[in-house]
Amino acid sequence: MSNQGVLVTYSSSREFLATDHWKQVWAALLCQFPLRTLVWRGPGRSSQSTQTIQDLNVRIAPLESVKQEHTSQVPQTLLEKPLLNLYFVVCEDNETYKNTIKKQIRDWHTIISQRKYQEWLIVHIVRPEGRAAQQRMFQMKTSVLDKIKADFNLDKKDRCVQLVWASDFENPAAWAEFITKLKEGILAAFDSAFTQREAEMKRSEGQIQMPGWNFCTFFILKESLAISLEGINLFEDALEQYNELEAAFFKVVRDRNLSWFGSLIDPDPEDDSAPLLSTTRKPYRDLILGNTISIFDFRIYLLARQCILLSKLGRVAEICRRSEKFLTNFGRRLRELEDTLPEFFIESWIYSSALSVADTCDTWVSAVNLSKASQARYSALKGELMELAQQQLDIIGIRTGHLPSRPPFSIALSAPASRTTQSQRKSQTISRQELLAAISDRDALFDLYVTITNRAIEYYASAGRRKFAIKLHGNLAALDVVRDRLSSAFDTYKNLPAHYAPHGWTSLESFMRMQALSIHTSTEQAKDADWAHIVVDFLKAYVEDMGAELLMDVDDHKAYVTGLIESLRHAAAELQADMLYPDHPALSVTMAESEARLAQDQDGALLEVTVRNQLPCNLPVDEIVAVLAGHEGAQLTFSARVSSIQPGSTRLTLFCPSSTPGMFALQSSQVKMSRVVFERKEAKLAALSKTTRPKDLPALVRIPKDHHAVDVRLRPPKRIELGTPAYMTVSLQTGRNDISVATLRLVSPSGVQFHCQEAAIDEGGDNATLEAADDAIILRDVGKRQIVTVAVPHSDASSYHTLRVNVSIEYTTVTEPNLSRKLNIARFVATSLPITTNVEDFFRGTRLFSLFTLSTTSHQHVRIRSAELKPSRQDADSVSVVSCQSQKPDIVTVTPAQSGQFLFQLDTVRGKARDPMKLHITYRMLREEVESFINAAVAEIVADDPSLLPHRELLIDRLVEALSKSVDWIELYGVTGELVVPGNLSENSELASAFARLKEILGKPRPLNSSFDEWRDIIIPVDIPQMHILAAAQLRIFANPFSQQPSGQALPLFAGQPISAVVTVTTSFHWAPSEDAEMAQYLLRYDIQDMTGDWLVSGPKRGDFSAEDGSTFSSPVTLIALHHGELSLPKVMVNALPLPGKQRMRTSVIPSCETYQLHGAEKVMVLPRGGRTTYVVDMGREAIPA
Amino acid sequence: MPPQPRLNAVAFVSPQNHPILIRTFAQPRQDELKYHYIAHTSLDVIEERIASAQAAKSTECYLSLLYTMEDVAVYGYVTPLRVKIILALALTDAVVRDIDVIAIFKAMHTAYHLSVANPFLKVNMPLESVNDHAAMLSAGSAKWKAFRQRVDDVGRVMGASIPSSTSNASTQSH
């Protein structure tokens, strides 16, 4: 086998062999080998399958040197004997041929043709010139070659070839024909030999059932085929032969016919530590022939042969795979007779073999270039081999007691076989030195273990087999435990679960955590946050896997978990910081009802929840908390203190001391165990989409309104005085609470500032005291059922219609001094005035008439009781105001459609600096009036029947609600004061009688001015108007231009006739501003209105004049009426002219001036002018005959 | 007829590599860890095999022998929907015919297939993950007794002793 390739003999005449020529030919011939690309039709298969031999070595030897006789009966490789015999002829002369050469050839041919399965080839070496000559004389005589052919080549096959020996003998073309013939010859010979041997083998195979058949003989026979195939470099086919042999072996094994073998194993001293893949370690073939080979050796030989062939094919990964499979499989087999083997023989054998295979493969693989994928695969398999070796160490460790018999070490340990007596055991020992050391020395074993495992991890890592590597890390950690390297083991175990958790391998995860826990316990370390984390994670895994698949080596799960929780409880109390654990599956809090209840006897709401504990034991906890989220980020925290939660569902009632009514969704829930907090956040409400199933919708809960709870209301102040700092009233309603301290904070999102420092108690609160802080109003000692109203000034908010104020109130009651309740309420306050005023001023001499028009700014009805105009205190004696308002009706209702008008007359003394007057309006909104009316009515019936007291707010709410649904009652109420509540209120039978009584009270006619509850005031500062010049213009008609007095009686005026008139302008500086009081005179201009349709004006229609206080200017004009009828006189406009020499801002200053027409209401009768009028008068009739 | 291979454990793993069911038929209880390890590590090998199968455009479900350990041979199978089935057979020194192993795999696949066909498994699932196996399986998880029963039946036919802890375990699971 060592001498690869086929054997070819050569022969020639002795003379030729002695020449230099031959030496040249010989050298050139050797250069042609190995042969390339031989195509063989395959070992006895159909013609389709052709095998291509890439290259084939040829050994060429003289014929004489090859021995002919079979030395033994043992089938040897087919390549032992020559396949082809060559004869070289150098002869260009027919005569020489005939005389000597022919005989030489014949002698040779006689020897050769007797040999079986050998081909022959005669090579005729010619010189180029000889060849040319040959062609020249082609016609005349046959060539030497033809003669040779004629003499020897009797069958069709052409066994003669001409080799042209030219100077360029290295030219492949010259050799082509020879090489082809050579290949043909070799293949033909091999084919015939192979076919014969194969037939022999088949015959033997067919005789399996016959007595006397011997597997070993068959094996050698078949193996010879394999070796032959290997010899011609057909490794694939050779491997196939061995695979068939292996299958045949298993067939034999199955038939339990192993008589051809020696014992299963006959261990040699070195067997356990020898390299596995060696065919030369023992004389295997001889052992086989002698039928004495042990199955152990036989299997190893078979495997080694296969692997060697695989290595030639470059399939190293396959080698590892086969070896590993063999080691495990055959290892099992050996276990059956473990007792007869030296101690740890199997382990040592597998261990050594695994390592040796890896090493052998590494030497083989260096020759091959592996692709990345196959490199990875190779590494993975090497890793498996290392792991196999490591498992042997496991077994050894456990057997010797160096390692404890528990997972993960015991994984490799198969079910304990029945151990028989040790007596049969041979005294022989294993020979692997490192294992011997490991058996006797604990630390040696550990070191070896770590080395091997790390090698495996390294291989796995390079192969990308992460999970294998993780597993081995676990093993190393377990080893660390054994070696008392607890801290590193603890670290490993702490980190490993992270690799298992993401894919839900909870069983392995929990195993790791348990290991970590037990290490922690055994080291008696402080149970710190790390430890608590592991416990909680472990419980998570425990719950998720539901115990059934849990890999716990404790007997009583429940007791174990209970103990764990017990210590977690203690550890939790000693944690430095809160440990928040999100979404722990063991605990869940869900809402049991969709509506919360009110606590009734105190402020707050009660929420029913179901707490589910998936653990098998009671869980000691401190508190259960549920956080509800509502409108505008409002949050309510419900909680209950409990001592423990039982397994399964528990229904609990959580309490929130400060609840606000509304709809809420469960946002998160917490179960607190000292500092360990299990938190579960509900799905983000914003993340809702169409595809969300009903199950995932947020759990909603409605919290009803508590009428007896603390409440805060904000109102505009009772009395609004424009021009003074704005404030609003904050009323705190205590309800059932006896408040010791309440802190109110007001914040407006629109940026309006509240000046809490300047707040003052407005009304209510018998003993209440106010304490002003920078940013809060602190009220103390407010008793039950009180309403304390505090006025709080704030910065200007007039640009807003309504102001949103976020009120946060924190209060404690006398009964529960330790419980501080917090409420956050949003309130809206109207900051704009409900009514607007418009003023019209009319000056008349020293008097002024002011007309105030009040209209509502909203859709609300406003009831106005009075409007008074009051002069400021200093002006009380100089200004007198007379209201022109009639006293009936005393209440004016201003609706959006109808405004109210109030007229005042002022009489002033001239020249005094005047402060603004104040318009004082007393009003209230219709809504407020009705509400207070209802309040009064309810108070009345409550006074009659104190049992209704708790329902007071409910009654009011119901009535207001009913009224707001309809507007029909407004008109009737406005006129008569009867409030007819629409709708049916008494569906609640309990309160039916109360409602009936209320309706009765409200429905009674009532004087409109009956005063219940208070009115609101609004005080508007009003400036007294100023006017530099007040002109009273008059156009008077005189009888003639000369009369001094206007005609006392109505003159007959005719159209077209000139009428004398005088324009009179009387000026007064009474209303002049005091700073301009020194101005003695102004320049004025009058202008008579053009009334071109009625009047012609003749004379100074326009003129300037100088006016002084109290002076009268007059100017005569003539008027002509243009038509008859009742005509009003033209108006006289008076304007002030710019003050001479005074300029302000580059424009001339014009004093203010107002003119009123004294004759504005006068009309004159203009008669038509003269003319004739014909009247037809009935002249009577003839006398009536008697 | 060669002796049937002895079934030690079977594992079902979802396409996302979540364990669905790991059933151990071997006797000593502490072997559970071993088979969990086997199931977990097999995923690496299965991934390699799938990758090479994809490279070869093969649609074969059966992945043949994955690897051997001291006393078990691990076989792999991938259903067309990528659920992985892993068998741990007791190692023997006889030839295990692929056809036998495939028969077990087919039986296991059928057991899974019948169980997963239960329409009520989807009842409590979010809508978007209806076609997601892993979600569905976790929805079934511990309550999925019918599946376990079917797998046990296959195991029983294989001659595996069904661990008596089955009943204990199922009563333990709440």
Image (spheres, coloured by chain):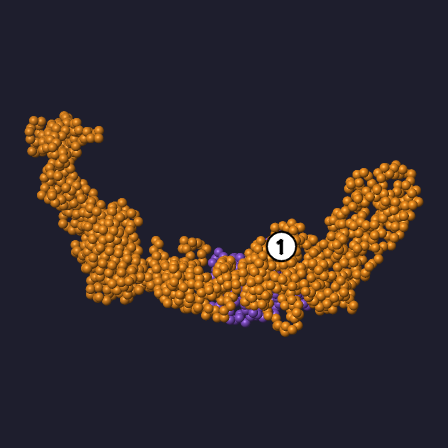
Chain colours: A orange, B purple
Please rate how many residues cluster around mark 1, counting C-alpha atoms within 10 Å: few if below 14, some from 14 to 19, many from 20. Answer: many
What is the total number of numbered labels drawn onto the structure image?
1
Left or right: residue A992 versus residue B135 is: left
Q: Quadrant of residue A165?
A: top right
Q: Residue furthest top?
A: A1099
Q: Quadrant of residue A530?
A: bottom left
Relative vertical location of residue A228 with respect to residue B152 in this rendering, above or below: above
Residue drawn at (16%, 51%) of the image: A890
Q: Nearer the viewer, residue A742 or A32?
A: A32
Could you tell me residue A1013's position as x and y percent? 19, 56
| Amino acid type of the residue tagged 1 in the rendering | Tyr
Q: Quadrant of residue A1007?
A: bottom left
Q: Chain of mark 1?
A: A
Q: Nearer the viewer, residue A421 or B124?
A: A421
Location of mark 1 (residue): A378
Could you tell me residue A1178's position as x and y percent? 13, 35
